[in-house]
Amino acid sequence: MKILDVPQTGKLGLTVTFPSRNGLIRRTLVTPANPNTAAQLRVRSAFTQQAHRYDTLTTAEQDAWVAAAGQYQSRASLGQSGPLTGLQLFVKINSLLAQLGQDVVDAPPALPLFGNVAPQNLVITNTGGAIAVKLTCPTSPGQNTLLRSAAPQRSGVRRAPSMVILGMCPTPAQGSADITSLYVARFGVAPVGSRLFVQANLVTDGWQGPKAQFSAVVPASA
């Protein structure tokens, strides 16, 4: 139910409170389902391995991460944030590198300067029942454009749900990067009338640039 109270988030007894776009919500605490999918297990494994690996660093190496982390703020919650810890920055950088199959690092990489992503729009076609999902790319996305998406949503949805990694943006042909196989491998064939969300951002040395988000509705067969 929606409540009027001081801003808050978290569990209290048998209830949980959280801010939403409709205001402050309080509901009965329910343990969410945990399907333990292969993708979930890979992410959790990467976090766990890198958290343990931090303890194997030398004191000097850990101090370097602590110094670097002090320059970056955590994501704000209820209007508050603070500097990252060395462990948080280490896991943030290296868990992503591990998920992408890239070499993990022992020293904090410098924050790169990110340009604009190559993808400019999401275009979905349905030719005789064959649905194609493509990103318009006037320029090459290179080797470091990461794509995320979510399961198909109702057409009226405008707020993007939680995204998961699809993979790196493929090389475009005639100005379009075909991501159909990436999407189907993760979520299956999207039904007609559903809305798809895709995010693209540059990744360099484990750092992520700003995300560009696109959405489109799967059309009826032409």
Image (cartoon, rainbow, N blue to C red):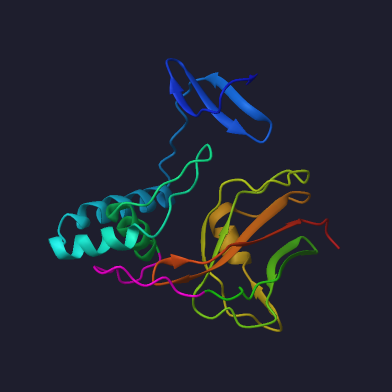
Q: Position of residue 173 (x, y in %)?
A: 66, 82
Q: Nearer the viewer, residue 174 or 67?
A: 67
Determine the main secondary structure of the stretch shown in magenta: loop
| Residue plotted at (78% across, 43% down) | 156
Above-or-below relation of 1 to 9:
above
Q: Nearer the viewer, residue 83 or 58?
A: 83
Q: Nearer the viewer, residue 5 or 174?
A: 5
| Residue plotted at (55% across, 28% down) | 7
Q: Position of residue 135 (x, y in %)?
A: 68, 70
Above-or-below relation of 87 to 32:
below
Q: Is residue 109 magenta?
A: yes
Q: In which quadrant is the N terminus drawn? A: top right
Above-or-below relation of 94 to 33:
below
For the magenta stretch, what is the residue range?
100-113
Q: Position of residue 16 (x, y in %)?
A: 49, 23
Q: In which quadrant is the C terminus drawn? A: bottom right
| Residue plotted at (61% across, 60% down) | 199
Q: Is residue 55 magenta?
A: no
